Image (tube, rainbow, N blue to C red):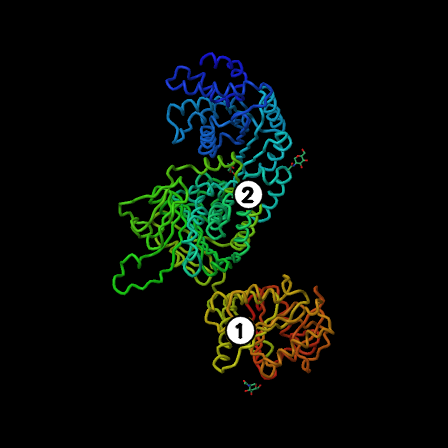
Amino acid sequence: MWAEIDLCSEDLKSKRFFFCVGDWCDWGWTMRKATWGLLLLLTCAATCDQSGQNQDGEQKGPSRRGHVSVVVVGSTGDLAKKYLWQGFFNLYASQVGKGYSFSFYGGGLSPDGRGTPLLFEILKSQDCPVDVSDERCALVREQFLRLAQYRQLKTEEDYQALGQHIETQLKQEGMVEAGRLFYLSVPAFAYADIAQRVNRSCRPPGTAWLRVVLEKPFGHDSNSAQELATQLASSLKEDEMFRIDHYLGKQVVSQILPFRKGNRKLLKSIWNKHHIDRMEIVLKETLDAKGRISFYDQYGVIRDVIQNHLTEVMTLLTMSVPKNLTDCKEINRNKLKVFSALHQLDMPSAVLGQYQTYNSEVQLELNKTKDHFSLSPTYAGIAVHTTMPQFDGVPIFLVSGKLLDERVGYARITFKNNVFCAQDQTSITCRPKQIVFYIGQGQLQYPAILVSKNLFKPALVNNGWKEVIENDDTLLFGIPLSDYYIQTPVVQQEAYTELISQVFRGRRDHFVSAESLLASWKFWTPLLNSLKHTFPRPYPGGAANGNLLDFQLQGREVRFCSEALVNMIPQEKTESFQVMQGKYRSADMVSAWSKELVERLAHDLQEAAEESVQEGTPFHLALSGGSSPLALFKQLTQHHYAFPWWNTHVWMADERCVPPNEAESNFRTIHDHLLQHVHLPYFNIHPMPVQLNQRLCVEEDGGALVYEQDIARLVNSSSFSYVLLGVGFDGHTASLFPGNRLGSSGERLVALTESPLKPHQRMSLTFGAINRARRVSVLIMGKGKHELVTQLSRIKDTPDRWPITKIQPVNGRLVWYIDYDALLGQ
Ligand SMILES: *[C@@H]1O[C@H](CO)[C@@H](O)[C@H](O)[C@H]1NC(C)=O
Ligand SMILES: *[C@@H]1O[C@H](CO)[C@@H](O)[C@H](O)[C@H]1NC(C)=O
Ligand SMILES: *[C@@H]1O[C@H](CO)[C@@H](O)[C@H](O)[C@H]1NC(C)=O
Ligand SMILES: *[C@@H]1O[C@H](CO)[C@@H](O)[C@H](O)[C@H]1NC(C)=O
């Protein structure tokens, strides 16, 4: 035995990385006298024998898998200290004897003299992996330390030197290279430069892989994320980049899809809007942002954890389960579908809070004066909705905050209970039904998946998991643990350990693709922009928050349940009330701040529709295009559930000559913002026929006539119940522009017209058609329209230049809805 080991000991000395997978051989040496050393030696000898026969580097057996160089840039920072080196140590321990050899480079800005002791201090203190005995761990650690070195990585030359070092070493030791793993644990602004240097100086030759791991933040909005993505793409290929969201490495999070797949038969019938009451994705922290303010204040809670961690969990809960759980392309496709189906968020989709001492921390850490006020939220509650038919109408709450009552992360799906218990209300069938993905911390103290016993008994889909038979009466969400089936991982594993192991194995399914990253930013950016000037509600922190941060859903909007105790929010527009009535151009006018104005208009519209219902006649509503009615549509779809849509016909006041599915199409706008969200019979929808015979608005195709005939056929006396109009800066309304030759009465109801703006061709109701209506409303909003409103109030005798002034219903009523901004120009 000794002879055998001695035979290859020469090789072992010089090629310890190469032969015998290095590690095992070295163990053999160091542990000659160890009681269990024999086994190692045997293994070593066997391995040596194999590789020893092949001095030209063409190894057989496990050692042929090659050499891996790991480079941690930012290797002595907080993250590296707390998680990354532990992850690499665990990786190393798990790979010992499996055919790879390693070297580890800790990179940093400090010169070697200063960095080396710092690095080794950290490396020495790594914990033993749970499944490794102390004895063995001591060996692995010793070996790990020998394979590690510190390198200053500051300049281009430093990276060149590193690249050369790796190559020289490989050559000297006759090693085959498997790949290089760079972990960038540095601020995001440094990514692009480092990626460029890695590409220039450290890219491995031949078939060896290059993997570069990046951490959030990947930008702070849509544009910056896109910019960063473009910069990185010039240095690294998409499949070389591993964007970490460490939440995806949490055991419970990475189990969501396997759980859904493994229990699909049971979930199939209940994973939908008919059964799910709501989803809650929550990450609560008890700590504040002290010490991190210079980072945190630029981001705030939405960018810090909601745009990434909670959004990822949301996609895992709502995406369709991929056929192949490790196929990252399919996962990516399914995630993108989730993003494309989300309702856009804006200001009323969120409530914001800020713990009370935050601002003084900002002043202190950012060196600001006492009058500096930060608007960064440290708490946010957001209601997300999707148009996916499966979940349409199911609210998804995303909530996170600092200085809350407990530290916990979970995703909870509560189900509607459709059972009626005649007598025993406490019987199990009557209790709440839920599935909880308990991600970590909190009351349970262990990660787990819980399913109410009155739902179903979930299968154990992964042999790394076990059932928990819990006897105590701990309450979770008010329900004793004994009411749940509980699963938990057999061994608890840090997220970083899991993810580092996946990078090493080249598995990408738990990483964030560029596409889904950009989709996520595209989804969050409009909300972030709309909240830019919103004052967050101050909260004291911890238990003292009481119910202060509770919020409730109204339609798709949220608001705090209680009035704030300390109201620091300067109310911009608190002018007493609210809706004013008067006369404008000798017709009725309603005026208010835009929000109240839209509420009033929606209310009036519904009243008019209900009148028609009472008369037993259909409500014929003609809508114009443009952006002004969008707020009205939103109000109608989110607050007017009793609107008699089934009795309503939707007509168009005008249309642009473009195909109906194009963004410029008025019908498309009305479809996306109104029709899509309400239930009215399809045959009550009347788009203008601008596209006939595969061409757009050609006179001889007679589109205008077709529409006119439809009106005459369906609308009694061709008199619409309600026409809603806006006004352009040039005084046009519908698509009736200044200088149009159409008279204000006349026989025609519909005509082709010309716009000075693109697309020039239009189809429009005529003055004649509009003036027959029973009711016409003109909606004007925004400061930009103030000049116009002033001008219109004076014009008397040049109606051809101001088409809107030709709107004079013959038997109907005209009402102007003008908001204060447009009316007063403030
Ligand atoms: C990497 O650098 C080379 C030149 O050094 C360049 O041709 C290439 O486009 C860069 N990017 C990628 C992704 O390879
Ligand atoms: C699943 O996808 C992975 C990665 O694309 C692939 O390697 C594997 O063969 C696939 N499995 C099946 C059963 O298709
Ligand atoms: C804080 O401001 C003071 C006075 O303006 C200045 O002397 C000091 O260097 C600043 N400190 C930091 C950390 O910016
Ligand atoms: C149709 O309209 C006329 C007046 O325009 C009205 O007298 C008549 O009652 C209406 N018919 C129905 C069925 O509503």
Horizontally, is 127 left or right of 368 in the view? left
For label 1, the residue is 590
> Is 726 situated above or below 749?
above
* 460 and 401: which is toward the camera: 460
> Is 134 situated above or below 645?
above
* 15 and 409: which is toward the camera: 15
Residue 177 in percent (x, y) is at 58, 27
Q: Quadrant of residue 152?
A: top right
> Is 495 situated above or below 605?
above
The mark found on residue 218 in the picture is 2
Residue 136 in percent (x, y) is at 40, 24
Q: Residue furthest left?
A: 423
Question: What residue do we see at 47% from left, 33% from top?
Answer: 84
Q: Secondary structure at mark 2?
A: loop
For ligand 4, the image quadrant comes to bottom right
* 585 and 545: which is toward the camera: 545
